[in-house]
Amino acid sequence: MCGIAGLIHRGKSSNVGNELQQMLQALKHRGPDSTGYALYAENEGKNFIMRFKVGENVGEGSSSVNEDESVYDERKKLVDSMLSDLGAKIIKEDRLTPYSFRYEMDFDKDLMEFSKKIESIENVEILSIGKSLELIKDLGDAKVVSDRYNLSKVKGTHAIGHARMATESGVDIKSAHPFWGYPFSDVSVVHNGQLTNYWNNRRSLENKGMRFMSECDSELIAVYLAEKMRNGASLEEGMKESLTGLDGVFTYFVATKDSLGMAKDTMAAKPLVLYESDELVAMGSEEIAIRSILPQEIDTYDPFDGEVKVWQI
Amino acid sequence: MANLKTTTSKKSKAQSMGMHTEVLTGRTQQKFFNPDEAENFYYFGTYDVDFNKRTDLDVKDMTAPEANKEIDNLMSQGFGTIVIKNPQGKHSIGVGILNKLNLIIEGSLGYFGIGSCDGPVVRINGRVGWSCAENLMAGKVVIEKNAGSCFGAAIRGGDLICKGSVGARTGIDMKGGTIIVGGDAGAFTGFMMQRGRIIILGDVGINLGDSMYDGTIFIGGKIGSYGSDAVDSKLTKSDQDWLKRKLKVAEIGENFDVSKMKKIVAGKKLWNYDNLEPTEKKGAI
């Protein structure tokens, strides 16, 4: 089933970490397996922020194989060494859990080549890279993940998130949403639905050099849009093309460093409720997500079938 | 009843061919509606209520089952007008009301609001989520703002009115009653409807009336596309009179020019009784 939520403050910054946590917690019944946040945070804007993992959460409910934590340290050393070889200078590093890290780096070369090399290390995955995107995902509900990664005080302009019920792939971090729009910095996607032409599209995109890290059908949307943008399409153009290029039922959100978009398939089979004002756009799979941050009476509506919308900060 | 007994006692052609010979057990329709037993009739979950007896119910800190039980409790105390405060998009509020009742909801509902009801008059001052008033048997439900998808799914009767716009699959599988929408409607409006009427004053999306079995759809605006077996029909004078009356009663589009509305019905090309029940059809003829 899955639940998705997103919001964008236009012209100002807000406590998006806490707001998104409330929205996703209200949707917990739609997806109890894992929760993911893509927060577009107030950072200095000079350095790249890379979030990556060197292993999986093997806690209760996980479908991952248990590993000795010592392998995490070995993989981290390999990452550090690779970063040095690639000319990236680590300015600040945080170990958030035994298996996940946040690095601030000085780096100005090709991201695609960079990502390929880092991810060539066994079980290492870049969750996100960019100058404002902070992508966090892990097993557990919204509050559990928010507390684990200390997200409640993160300020920013916009955010998207996902409460996942695993249906198409395992209960693990690599299959959790949001997905990073590799190789574009600061692009993330969340999805509710099922894509039925996943393998055809995946084969085609892999032949064009695009990278898939999971077997989750939703990852296809991020890669599909990234490939369109790589060929010169705007975000909105790519999203409109996805209505016919992707088969199945879907409602998805995509965010970039300065925009937030939504698309709904032509069957309108997946729910979405939307609130839109001059200051704030908030949307979610169910109205209770919006009500969790806007308890006062407001006007909301369901976008129609085949609708694509993009908002700027 | 006497005539009915005579009719049922006569063997039909199908029965003479060896079909439908099973013996029904339990309470039959004939027994259930026997007027001699009228005094024993009891419609479970109904109460005598006084519409002038009014109360507020704040559901802010209640779950849906708690709120619905409290509505039932208030009806059992004779309250005929109940005002729900702070619904805040909660799901499944106001379901299973089998009673005459004035229910006023000050705010918006989530999914499955006012489902499986028979008789109440409900006014919702906000918006409703998916599947509002699903399986409505009788009564009237008025939504002041917008509604989500599957609005009025499988309703059997009553009037369901949305003054704003509605999502996809409005009136899916409906078997009676009337749905009236003041704004636009999404894709697959009237999908697989079997009876009843849908009135949309604005535009509708693709696949209007797809696979509709019967019933009528009236559209005031543009049509995205027709669904399989949905065809245009002539808008008659009596149709227009009915539309005017209905829109007036619904407090919506009273001055709307109904003469320009399009009328869509089932082409009945998908009816395939010849394949499914050949002997039955011959028997009926």
Image (cartoon, coloured by chain):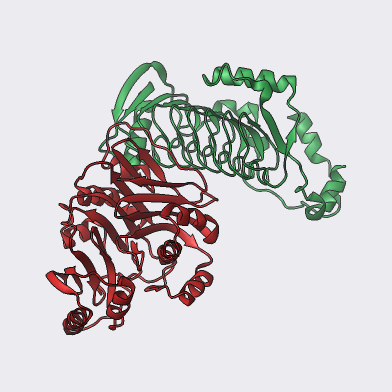
For this orientation, the residue located farthest to the top is: B52
Left or right, A201 with respect to B275, comes to left
- Expressed as whole percent of the image width and height from the top left, the position of residue B251 reads 51, 19
Chain shown in red: A
Q: Colour of chain B?
A: green
Q: Nearer the viewer, residue B175 or A58?
A: A58
Tally of numbered discs: 0
Q: Is residue A128 above or below residue B226?
A: below
Across and down, in percent, residue B155 comes to 57, 37
Q: Is residue A103 in view? A: no
User: Which one is nearer the viewer's eye here, A179 or A241?
Assistant: A241
Q: Is residue B118 visible?
A: yes
B53 or A213: which is nearer to us? A213
Residue under the image location 33 percent in, 57 percent down: A162
Residue A224 x %, y %: 45, 64
Q: Position of residue A31 (x, y in %)?
A: 35, 58
**Residue at left 27%, top 72%?**
A109
Q: Up-down: is A34 above or below A6? A: below
